Amino acid sequence: MTERQDPWLLTPGPLTTSAETKEAMLRDYGSRDSAFVEMNSRIRGRLLKIARVANSHVCVPVQGSGTFAVEATLGTLIPKNQKTLVLINGAYGSRIAKILDYLGRAHECLETPEHVPVNVEALAAKLSESSDIKYVVAVHCETTAGILNPIEEIARTVADRGRYLLIDAMSSFGAIDLAPERVPYDAVIASANKCLEGVPGMGFAIIRESLLATCKGNAHSLSLDLYDQWQALESNGQWRFTPPTHVIAAFDQALDEFEDAGGIAGRYSRYQSNCSTLLAGLRAIGFQTLLPDALQAPIIVTILTPGDPNFEFGEFYDRLNDKGFSVYPGKLTKVESFRIGCIGKLDSQVIKEALAAIETVLTDMGITNLNPLEGNAAIAS
Ligand SMILES: Cc1ncc(COP(=O)(O)O)c(C=O)c1O
């Protein structure tokens, strides 16, 4: 096994980052340093370039984890008297509805089970019958199951019916292209520490400028007001409140590495190779994975908990962690599962080493029956 101080993080985040990205944090920048102000402007520009919407959208960063950026975007863009439709097939869609509850924004939910993509026909019907719904919020890759939602069809359906579309692309931005000519959107939300492989601590929204320009006074919260944050950044290049300087410096370095490695195409290809290696290896060992390959995003894989009485996730996790691989519990509501991520600064060699470690742990735990627990199997592909 590779000699490392830290475990490989095979999770939905925080994720493994490169040594150079961590080293970029060894400097203390003042928030008014011209080098730091330039760095902010460069990062905002680079993110727009990745999204290929520099002519129509602006990038507004915000302190905190991804959820802070989601909450800030919803609160800033959706006026207090407007109704939203939330497309839910997992915990992150449900979290969006919960945020709207907190914000006191009226909303309805269109829900499918966690292993089933958003139903675009039902979305079209809902929008046709509900003229009061003005905003739709979708999750691109629902990290709960690792499912890829049909974002192109969702975007076309929403745009054809003249509604605004906000996309939570937290776990996919930078790895799965949201081609703007095919996926028209008003806002996309992501964070530094997913597929862009920066460190955790800041998120950002890429927002249609003509929409954001109308959003003064919408926000429920001073610190999460992205209109105000945008205005400040445009006027003097500075964040309104103490910026996460080290996180920003690391992000700038991570974006250098992203560009050097071929941008979205390069990242997609590495993650896809990680994911195929993982799926093939898990199935060869005898595990059953939740999703059919056509719905599986190359981001995170959900594995059905084996029925063997010796399998106990806590012990499996600890033993694997001792061998240098950190996996993740499941988040499905109806099925017992655990997850293994494919993203972060790791390649298929790491995945192969993880698979070998998993086989050793299974042997050490005396686990021979990897068929899913009774009741779980029915839902699987
Ligand atoms: C799709 C999606 N949305 C939102 C979040 C929340 O991000 P955070 O945990 O950084 O707040 C995540 C985290 O994994 C996610 O995968």
Image (cartoon, grey):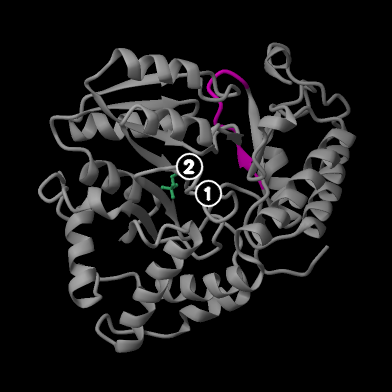
Question: At x 50% / y 61%, what residue is drawn?
Answer: 50
Whether residue 168 sits left or right of residue 366 in the image: it is: left
Residue type at mark 1: give it: Ala
- Tell me whether the residue at label 2 lies in contact with that at label 1, contact meaning CB atoms closer than 8 angstroms: yes
Asked if residue 367 can be seen in this view, the reply is yes
* Residue 245 placement (x, y as % from top left): 36, 75
Residue 2 on image: x %, y %: 80, 66
Q: Residue at x 50, y 39 (%)?
A: 140
What is the number of the mark on residue 183?
A: 2
Disc 2 crowd rating (10 Å Cα; few below 14, some 14-19, many 20+) is some
Is residue 274 shown above or below 102? below
In the rendered image, the quadrant that contains the C terminus is: top right
Q: Where does the image place residue 241, in percent across and percent down from the top left? A: 21, 68
Q: Which residues are magenta?
A: 327-335
In this orientation, does residue 92 appear? no
**Front position in the image: 257 or 234:** 234
The quadrant where residue 275 appears: top right
Q: Which residue is mark 1?
A: 179
